[in-house]
């Protein structure tokens, strides 16, 4: 009896590759988003630390220097601009993530469909093979019975 062979096996492998590729793209975009979010948190902490160090370096009665204020203001603006840019990138990534998630889900559905078809056909093949084997056994039993007489 020949072994079961799924005639759409090549398509199933293509669908599996497509799913893997979509999953990797989705994961990559998600990692970019996470990296930007972590960078935003780090920038906020750095800004707060910078401000606290500056204020601690000045005593209670010390005057604030104009240059120091301008330096902090410029640094603060640069950090806030970077955070705003990162937030814009995060929004773009979120929109892209929605598309990539849909592609990934679609690829998963297509692969699942072929897997179910393969399982269904394999079960039918095994059932048919079992019937053939049972029929052969039955024929052998009948032959033995008739030969004994």
Image (spheres, grey):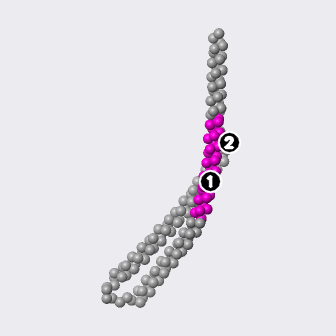
Q: Is residue 16 above or below residue 67?
A: above
Looking at this view, name the residue that lies furthest to the left: 60
The magenta stretch is 96-125
Secondary structure, mark 1, is helix
Q: Quadrant of the N terminus?
A: top right
Mark yes or no: residue 18 visible: no
- How far from the left and from the top, in percent, is residue 3? 63, 35
Q: Which residue is mark 2?
A: 7
Q: Which residue is mark 1?
A: 107
State the image quarter where residue 144 is shown.
top right
- How far from the left and from the top, in percent, is residue 46? 42, 75
Q: Counting other residues with Cα less than 10 Å from the Cα at mark 1, is it few (<14), some (14-19), or many (20 or more)? A: many
Query: In the image, which is nearer the foreground, mark 2 or mark 1?
Result: 1
Residue at horizontal 65%, vertical 41%?
Answer: 6
What secondary structure predominates along the stretch shown in magenta? Answer: helix
Q: How many marks?
A: 2
């Amino acid at each position: 009896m020949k072994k079961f062979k799924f005639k759409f096996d090549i398509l199933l492998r293509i669908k599996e590759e497509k799913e893997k590729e979509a999953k990797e793209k989705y994961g990559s975009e998600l990692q970019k988003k996470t990296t930007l979010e972590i960078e935003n948190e780090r920038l906020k902490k750095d800004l707060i630390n910078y401000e606290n160090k500056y204020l601690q370096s000045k005593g209670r009665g010390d005057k604030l220097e104009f240059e120091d204020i301008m330096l902090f203001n410029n640094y603060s603006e640069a950090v806030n601009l970077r955070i705003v840019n990162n937030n814009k990138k995060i929004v773009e990534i979120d929109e892209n993530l929605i598309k990539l998630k849909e592609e990934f889900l679609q690829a998963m559905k297509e692969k699942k469909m072929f897997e179910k078809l393969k399982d269904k056909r394999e079960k039918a093949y095994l059932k048919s093979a079992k019937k053939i084997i049972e029929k052969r056994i039955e024929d052998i039993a009948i032959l033995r019975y008739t030969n004994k007489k």
